[in-house]
């Protein structure tokens, strides 16, 4: 880790560089650079248009919409159980987590609650999808800065988590496992022991990434003090998840709201970082993955017995009303505003996805950043295209 | 009245907001914007809805941000309360179109217009969120929230594109998803879902009896 002296040195170098820029006024004509829609630094097709002055960005504009699938319209012609299939595809790396807030909103309107065992397994799978999602982020992070090894480590260890999700739900990426009133199936035999050993493996992976990346001087110089988002800006733009906590806002929907999930039964720490730069965002995510493995271990130890499905009518009709439920998904706050008119399907579903807000801050944060840092700032904000466009 | 995070433990859900807090928020907003607060609804232990007059939309935003302390911006979007003239797109194309309900009925906190703009903001220190709605008058124009919450920018662009509602004061209402020359507003209820009209839903053609129904002869299906 960089100690205080090193940071002082870095600050000094940065100050010298800034002075040099002021003293030597180079003639630099403006230039427009188009990054994407296909670009290695993006998980999907986000196009960014930047206006450069020399090496520095003076104006940036992300252009989303290459993957808009119109889910809000499609939900209006589908029944409640059919909708989970759609919303699985919003954030495709942590699919199960997308289902939970929608199902909870429907359950809230129907005034039913899943039995305890179903709630625990839901929370368990929720955290497993968080681990699968963020472990890929941690690996990919290296690739953005030229470090190839962490990617392979990430894919290797994420595979074990995906195998767990597959063994329980039958689907590796799109489980479609959550039902109104409970879950489709119980956990398979041997799941608990297997999960404990995978969690140990994942903690090892976190240690490896910390050694390989976070302690690396190249990584630190590329991320520390780059892309700083202050607290006030972060809340105004509605940044959520690790991006918000990295700006020093202590806000985690797992802890800070009452939902029929089992987060109040486990002990975990919500990590924050005061800096708000790229490094802080990555670091908070690393710690979050560690916490998630601990949550999974605790949930497995305390798993109650009992049914996994509440008594629900065969044909699900949701009574008239409006409900908002949001959860702390791997990417941030994901919520559904469900309006029901008492029919088989919802009248309107507003999908609030985390990446949409997280990326809307890029015109603000990219201003003044140097060209190679565009990629690291974007990587540290961590977005999934399906989560922006829906 | 601030609930300190160190006081919030997983053992004591009582530290989370009670309903006195939500009623207090209603009073605070009323003190700021007066009778522009048309209606409010507190659902015990659940959530809070407010409805304000359209001309006070921005003032209500400032009141929520500065007085109530809801600094965290969640989303802005719109609701179209007209029942869809196409139903759920499952009509049999060989039959004449069925009679449908055309009455515009608004949801919680009522309303007078077909469209409503609604938003959600959160107080991250008190752990309480507010859903706020406003009617959209016939000129389909609502004051913009960009001066209140910078993050409203993209959300208002999306709402403009999907519902055709203009946000006065927002000078960059370009489309986000659709080509600029696209005609129509896809999330309006009277905008047909074309794929459903062109190719009927397979459920109309091959209907399987639901398990457990009276004429269930398929055993386990």
Image (cartoon, rainbow, N blue to C red):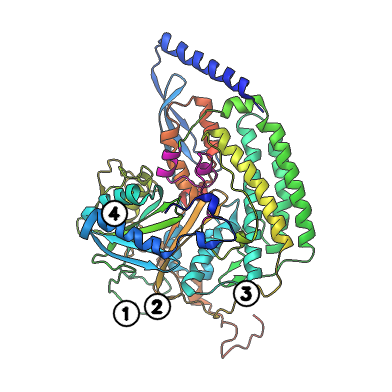
Q: Chain of mark 1?
A: B
**Which residue occupies 54% across, 32% down?**
A375
User: In what element is the residue under mark 3?
Assistant: loop
Within 10 angstroms of label 4, few (less than 14), some, or many (20 or more) residues? some
Circle 1 or circle 2, nearest the eye? 1
Report which residue position mark 2 lands on. B94
> What percent of the width, then of the height, locates residue A18?
47, 16
Q: Chain of mark 4?
A: B
Among all residues in the image, which is located at the extreme bottom?
B214
Q: Is residue B56 magenta?
A: no
Mark 1 or mark 4, earlier in chain: 1
- Magenta range is A231-256
Report which residue position mark 1 lands on. B99
Spatial CA distance of label 1 from label 3 is 38 Å
Report which residue position mark 4 lands on. B164
Circle 1 or circle 3, nearest the eye? 3
User: In what element is the residue under mark 2?
Assistant: loop
Within 10 angstroms of label 2, few (less than 14), some, or many (20 or more) residues? few
Report which residue position mark 3 lands on. A309
Q: Chain of mark 3?
A: A
Q: Is residue A236 magenta?
A: yes
């Amino acid at each position: 880790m960089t100690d205080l002296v090193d940071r002082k040195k870095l600050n000094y170098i940065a100050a010298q560089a800034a002075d040099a820029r002021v003293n030597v006024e180079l003639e630099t004509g403006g230039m427009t650079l188009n990054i994407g829609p296909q670009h290695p630094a993006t998980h999907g097709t986000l196009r960014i248009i930047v206006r450069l002055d020399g090496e520095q960005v003076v104006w940036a504009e992300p252009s989303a919409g290459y993957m808009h699938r119109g889910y809000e319209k499609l939900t209006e012609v589908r029944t409640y159980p059919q909708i989970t299939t759609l919303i699985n595809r919003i954030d495709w790396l942590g699919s199960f987590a997308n289902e939970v807030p929608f199902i909870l909103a429907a359950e809230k309107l129907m005034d039913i609650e899943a039995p305890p065992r179903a709630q625990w397994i839901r929370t368990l799978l929720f955290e497993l999808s968080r681990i699968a999602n963020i472990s890929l982020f941690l690996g990919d992070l290296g690739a953005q800065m030229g470090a190839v090894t962490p990617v392979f480590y990430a894919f290797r260890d994420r595979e074990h988590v995906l195998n767990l999700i597959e063994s329980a739900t039958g689907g590796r990426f799109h489980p479609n496992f959550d039902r109104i009133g409970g879950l489709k199936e119980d956990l398979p035999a041997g799941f608990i022991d297997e999960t404990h050993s995978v969690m140990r493996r994942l903690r090892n992976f976190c240690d490896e990434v910390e050694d390989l990346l976070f302690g690396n001087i190249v990584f630190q110089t590329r991320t520390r003090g780059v892309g700083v988002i202050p607290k006030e800006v972060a809340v105004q733009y509605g940044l959520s998840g690790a991006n918000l906590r990295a700006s020093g806002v202590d806000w985690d929907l797992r802890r800070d709201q009452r939902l029929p999930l089992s987060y109040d039964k486990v002990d975990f720490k919500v990590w924050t970082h005061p800096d708000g730069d790229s490094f802080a965002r990555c670091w908070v995510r690393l710690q979050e993955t560690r916490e998630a493995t601990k949550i999974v271990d605790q949930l497995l130890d305390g798993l109650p017995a009992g049914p996994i499905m509440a008594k629900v009518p065969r044909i699900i009709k949701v009574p008239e009303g409006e409900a908002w439920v949001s959860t702390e998904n791997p990417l941030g706050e994901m919520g559904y505003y469900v309006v029901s008119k008492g029919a088989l399907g919802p009248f309107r579903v507003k999908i609030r996805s985390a990446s949409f807000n997280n990326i809307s801050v890029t015109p603000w944060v990219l201003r003044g950043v140097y060209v190679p840092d565009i990629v690291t700032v974007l990587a540290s904000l961590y977005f999934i295209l399906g989560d922006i466009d829906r | 009245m601030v609930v300190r995070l160190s006081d919030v433990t997983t053992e004591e859900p009582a530290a989370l907001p009670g309903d006195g807090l939500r009623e207090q928020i209603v009073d605070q907003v009323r003190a700021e914007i007066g009778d522009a607060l048309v209606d409010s609804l507190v659902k015990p232990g659940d959530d809070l809805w407010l409805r304000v007059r359209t001309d006070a939309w921005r003032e209500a935003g400032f009141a929520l941000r500065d007085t109530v302390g809801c600094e965290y911006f969640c989303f802005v979007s719109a609701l179209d309360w007209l029942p869809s003239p196409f139903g759920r797109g499952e009509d049999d194309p060989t039959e004449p179109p069925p009679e449908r309900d055309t009455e515009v009925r608004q949801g919680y906190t009522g309303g007078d217009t077909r469209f409503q703009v609604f938003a959600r903001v959160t107080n991250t220190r008190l752990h309480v969120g507010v859903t706020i709605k406003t009617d959209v008058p016939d000129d389909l124009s609502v004051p913009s929230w960009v001066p209140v919450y910078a993050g409203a920018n993209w959300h208002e662009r999306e709402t403009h594109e999907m519902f055709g509602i203009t946000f006065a004061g927002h000078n960059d209402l370009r489309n986000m998803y659709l080509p600029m020359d696209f005609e129509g507003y896809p999330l309006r209820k009277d905008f047909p879902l074309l794929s459903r009209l062109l190719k009927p839903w397979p459920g109309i053609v091959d209907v399987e009896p639901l398990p457990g129904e009276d004429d269930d002869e398929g055993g386990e299906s």
